[in-house]
Amino acid sequence: MRCPFCHNPDSRVIDSREADEGATTRRRRSCPQCGRRFTTVEEAVLAVVKRSGVSEPFNRSKVVAGVRRACQGRPVDEDQLAKLAQQVEDTIRASGAAEVPAHEVGLAILGPLRELDEVAYLRFASVYRAFTSVADFEKEIAELKARPTGAAAPAAGPSDGP
Ligand SMILES: [Zn+2]
């Protein structure tokens, strides 16, 4: 790790600790050349493997982009999209795998999106699950209707954490 002060290409790790429940590692480093200290934060890369076999880093903004498309014209704001993407990331990280297939990202989107907006959910599910007929929609809508009433309402009030 290059020293940010003198650009010496070498540095020594003097302390290392996990943060954000292990998602990141903070390292305290010292530069053997100028003696100054600095901190680096390393984030474990969560990879998404596409059907083609190519893997890429998990990207929350890609989740947001995909969901935003399904939410066009729906009363869903950017905050809600960001929150959903965070939920998706949490779900995937909680699986404990360093690599997840792309379809699992889609799966992780479906649950919170259904809670957010049922129309957007249907749009997203139709693409994700490759609905091929009206019957596919009817089946999905029947499932939505079969859910207990009120389940779609936000569970938490405005005081949802600090
Ligand atoms: Zn230095």
Image (spheres, helix red, strand yellow):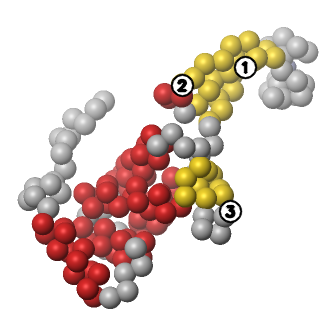
Tell which circle, 2 or 3, labels the residue nearer the N-terminal end: 2
Q: Between marks 1 and 3, how big is the CA–CA gap?
A: 35 Å
Q: Residue at x 82, y 25 (%)?
A: 3
Question: Which residue in the structure is indicated by mark 2?
Answer: 19
The residue type indicated by label 1 comes to: Phe
- Give residue 157's position: percent from left, percent from top: 17, 41
Can residue 82 be seen? no
Quarter of the rendering containing residue 73:
bottom left
Q: Tell which of 26 and 108 is nearer to you.
A: 108
Disc 1, disc 3: CB below 8 Å?
no
**Image label count:** 3
Is the CB of the residue bearing disc 3 within 8 angstroms of ligand 1? no
Between label 1 and label 3, give the one nearer the viewer.
Answer: 3
Question: Which residue in the structure is indicated by mark 3?
Answer: 54
Q: Residue at x 28, y 32 (%)?
A: 161
Q: Residue at x 83, y 20 (%)?
A: 11
- Give residue 29's position: percent from left, percent from top: 75, 18
Could you tell me which quadrant the N terminus lies in? top right
Q: Secondary structure at mark 1?
A: strand
Crowding around mark 2 (Cα neighbors within 10 Å: few <14, some 14 to 19, many 20+) is: few
The residue type indicated by label 2 comes to: Ala
The residue type indicated by label 3 comes to: Val
> Dividing the image into four equal quarters, which quarter contains ligand 1?
top right
Residue at the extreme left: 149
Q: Is residue 153 left or right of residue 126?
A: left
Q: Secondary structure at mark 3?
A: loop
Between label 1 and label 2, give the one nearer the viewer.
Answer: 2
Question: Which residue in the structure is indicated by mark 1?
Answer: 38
Q: Residue at x 69, y 17 (%)?
A: 28
